[in-house]
Image: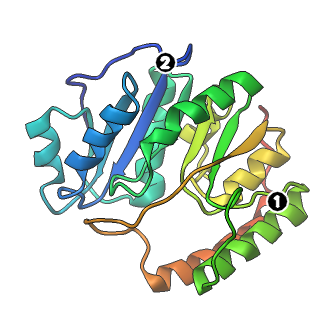
Amino acid sequence: MSLRSDGLRAEETGGKRLLVILPAYNEEASLPGTVRELREKAPGVDFVVVNDGSADGTEAVCLENGFPLLNLPTNLGLTGAFQTGMRYAFEEGYDAAVQLDADGQHDPAFLLPMLEKMETEKLDLVLGSRFLTEKRPRSLRMLGNALIEGAVRLTTGRRISDPTCGMRLYGRRVMKYMAYAPTARPEPDTVALLIRSGARTAEYPVSIRERQAGESYLSLGRSFRYMAQMGINIFILQWVMEKEKL
């Protein structure tokens, strides 16, 4: 792994230092627009691209534009790229970190309001949700989303309206676990474990857009396997794992 910190800032944003983690796998077409929008809608917020062993020109795009870059020599998958970014955020002393999709599906306009909510309400975790103010559409994927919501509610007593939304803001108290624990993943099963461990959590309404270019981590077949695995993890595996001491 190599790090280029060209242009990486450490500015104060609303009293908190926030790092945006952009895991990128074959995202050369999407990255420039995603970073441009991030800079426009969340000025003063630091970011780092985690190039997850891309086979296209993702690394070259970062170097040409001077994007802060953590360069993985091989493809580790979303969890590996996410943990790399979280480890960097923790070790560099950031107060909060958030993963944004490099393909532009996550709107950075929600970042500062989510950060303000975290600071005002003294939260450890702010979960983006598409369904706090809107009804969940009917589809096979949304059926899986509803089933995972039910699993989280049954095991934690908390209703998380959009457990599969990847736009999650992590506070300092949970960052160390997300950065170093081998079982920590940016997934609903880890969210459920954090809730059971006492993490102060709330949702914030966000919208998610369609990907414009690049290659998704999840195919249709992987999506079905993902939903099944999340259910197994939430109902079974997390009960044999120790609660994280927050």
Residue lying at 50% horizontally and 20% vertically, measured from the top left: 17
Q: Residue 70 falls in which quadrant of the image?
A: top left
Task: Measuring from the top left, give residue 152's x and y in whole percent.
Answer: 80, 62
Mark 2 neighbour density, 10 Å: few (under 14) some (14–19) many (20 or more) = some
Amino acid, disc 2: Thr
Residue 159 versus residue 198 in the image, above or below: below
Q: Residue 243 falls in which quadrant of the image?
A: top right
Residue 203 versus residue 144 in the image, above or below: above
Residue lying at 56% horizontally and 13% vertically, measured from the top left: 15
Judge left or right: residue 196 versus residue 161.
right
Task: Measuring from the top left, give residue 174's x and y in whole percent.
Answer: 66, 34
Give SS at disc 1. Answer: helix
Judge left or right: residue 61 versus residue 215.
left
Q: Which residue lies under the disc numbered 2?
A: 13
- Mark 1 vs mark 2: which is more N-terminal? 2
Tell whether label 2 touches label 1 (CB within 8 Å): no
Task: Measuring from the top left, give residue 129's x and y in whole percent.
Answer: 64, 55
Residue lying at 48% horizontally and 86% vertically, measured from the top left: 221
Amino acid, disc 1: Val
Q: How many marks?
A: 2
Q: Nearer the viewer, mark 1 or mark 2?
A: 2
Give SS at disc 2. Answer: loop
Q: Which residue lies under the disc numbered 1?
A: 240
Judge left or right: residue 104 versus residue 2.
right
Q: Residue 88 falls in which quadrant of the image?
A: top left
User: How far apart, in angstroms, are the residues tagged by discs 1 and 2?
Assistant: 39 Å
Instruction: Identify the disc placed on residue 102.
Output: none
Which part of the image, by quadrant, shows the N terminus?
top left
Question: Residue 85 versus residue 30: which sits nearer the camera?
Answer: 30
Q: Is residue 122 visible?
A: no
